[in-house]
Amino acid sequence: MPADVVQRSIDTIRTLAIDAVQQANSGHPGMPMGCAPMAYLLFGEVMAHDPGDPEWADRDRFVLSAGHGSMLLYAALHLAGYEQPTLEDIKRFRQLDGPTAGHPENFLLPGVETTTGPLGQGFANGVGMALAAERLAAEFNRPGHEIVDHAVYGIVSDGDLMEGVAAEAASLAGHLRLGRLVYLYDDNRITIDGSTDLAFSEDVLARFDAYGWHTQRVADGNDLEALRAAIKAAEEDERPSLISVRTVIGYGSPNKAGTSASHGAALGDDEVAATKQELGWPHTEPFTVPDEVRDHLDRTEAGAAARRDWQERFDAYRAEHPELAAEFERRVIRGELPEGWTDALPALEGKDATRKHSGAVINALAGTLPELLGGSADLAASNNTDVKDGGDFTADDRLGRNLRFGVREHAMASIANGMSLHGGIIPYAATFLIFTDYARPAIRLSALMGRKVVWVMTHDSIGLGEDGPTHQPIEHLPSLRAIPGLTVLRPADGPETAAAWKVALETDGPSVIALTRQGVPDLGPRPQGAVERGAYVVRDLHEGEPELALLATGSEVHVALEAAEALADEGVAVRVVSMPSWERFEAQDQAYRDQVLPPTLRARVAIEAAATLGWERWVGLEGAVVGMERFGASAPAGDLFEAFGFTAGNIVRVAKDVLAAQR
């Protein structure tokens, strides 16, 4: 290919980014200007991808962890021949209802593999994608049939590498030797505040050497031959790779290149014109894509040919391994649960901690759902997440069922998102509910992206006991319920726990299952599908219409029942409602909600060992909430429930006050 066409192609990526940011008067032009040669190579030469089928199972994945440089990705996708973004979409960069958002959003544009923006999240997502690919390759590949044969490429920034989540994820990736991972580090030495020297002086490659990564340095980000050679060497190494590429942010801008002025603001009309002149760009109209560039960068035919070649290989695989091929299609291509999988759900009876009931569910489903893969942040014995006799996923054994994330909650959560994004895996990730504080950015992003991840969070209240207030979640349940698209489930016994897992696995989005440390007894018989509906009547202790409702979740349902019996003995008509999931209950029709909580039943008391925020939605202005108004304390669980009023006696007193006010 003539050198001038190659250079014109790279500059087209640059000028599309410049023009889009200028038109929006908002965005980050500097990173795309400096990284355009990397995008040119990855999308034009290196990666196997098909613009006509962005979901092709064996495509290489690309992660723009430095999501503020989103125009780099949009330009690359457009020029590669993807249906979207169109040139009109690019002209509407950062505008309402457009697919070219300020940071890449995978649910808006096919070809965008993950939603990035919060720095470090994409880095860890890519680790999860590489982990999923290794797992699926071990499960499905057979001699002579490499049907899982793709890699994960990414561009990361100084900001990504400063974030703790990236450090955690890099450490685990090196430990697991995730050699499918190739990251190009945009070493432009500029952040928003100025030079990275202000706060960042470490030897990045030495750090990644210590993590067990393969590292290289490219002195000039415009040197295509050096970039090609480095990428080739990375692909041939069994370790994950980081290639430090020295770039100039805002490359081509006469007055802003190499400075923070080009990082997060439009260049300005005069500087745009001066930059195009500096680049030797001959076109005066913005958003110009020369025909020779469009022809050169279009990957439609090459991508379709690569996919057809894979399909032929898959057909040969199917002929030799029909059962494996059918399973691959179910899990990876269609993303379906197996028929009749719910038959494997266990019948859980007797008094036990719901975390132990959850462990029984995981083990009961392990054989039926091979796609269920997860683990804990060094708390497996407490979270009850191990698949017994399942072995560990390691650098030498990709078939182990248990992931050991180590004490890395941030990375664990983001890696789980990456596994889900890759496809073929339903990840679960576990720690104490208190440490959703560490996992929250990824939990929020799983909800934003609508990814099926099961967050298994144990030790869900002051019932944790002696570890004290640093480990006792108080505000966590209401704060998780505030995240749109997240289903929060707090089961009260074994059957509710099994049903909570059923809900989580059938929900097209993430779920948090909050589980007790302490044992809880059975609630007894309940209506079919009651838990799936979010709330249901556990017991009516009266004849005729109830005059008081006690609403509770988790372990507090049992205290509510005890209080209800005491009130019934005094002639009060009481209804006890278990509300394992507010989100599921809200999704029911009005008739069902009114059946459980009749509008005329205004005397209501909610009981939950958590902050009370949000319960007013269910108890109304005339009701009351028995909850936590302060942090907990270090003491045995029974003493804490007594001290903080989670007793039948206190609930009876509060209920009588509510009834008296009603009457």
Image (cartoon, helix red, strand yellow):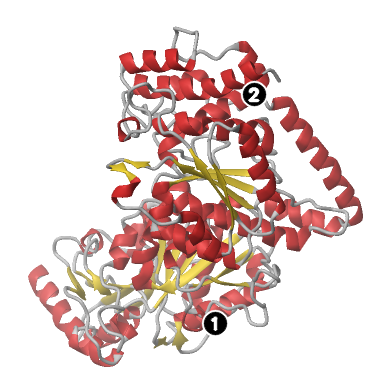
Neighbour tally class for label 1: few under 14, some 14-19, many 20 plus, Cα within 10 Å: some
Asked where in the image residue 24 lies, by quadrant, the reply is top left
Residue 295 x %, y %: 67, 17
Please indicate whether residue 176 sits to the left or right of residue 636 in the image: right
Q: Does 519 sit left or right of 642 as displayed? A: right
Residue 421 appears left or right of 542: right
Residue at 37 percent across and 17 percent down: it is 272
Of circles 2 and 1, which is in front? 2
Secondary element at image label 1: loop
Residue 305 image point, x, y percent: 78, 32
Identified at 82% across, 38% down, the residue is 309
Q: Which one is in front, 490 or 472?
A: 472
- Amino acid type of the residue that numbered disc 1 sits on in the rendered structure: Leu
Q: Residue at x 58, y 78 (%)?
A: 386
Mark 2 or mark 1, which has the lower sequence index?
Answer: 2
Name the mark on residue 348: 1
* Screen quadrant of the C terminus: bottom left
Count of numbered circles on the image: 2
Q: Element under label 2?
A: helix
Q: Could you tell me which residue is drawn at 30 percent across and 67 percent down?
A: 476
Front position in the image: 374 or 532: 374
Q: Quadrant location of the N terminus?
A: top right
Name the mark on residue 297: 2
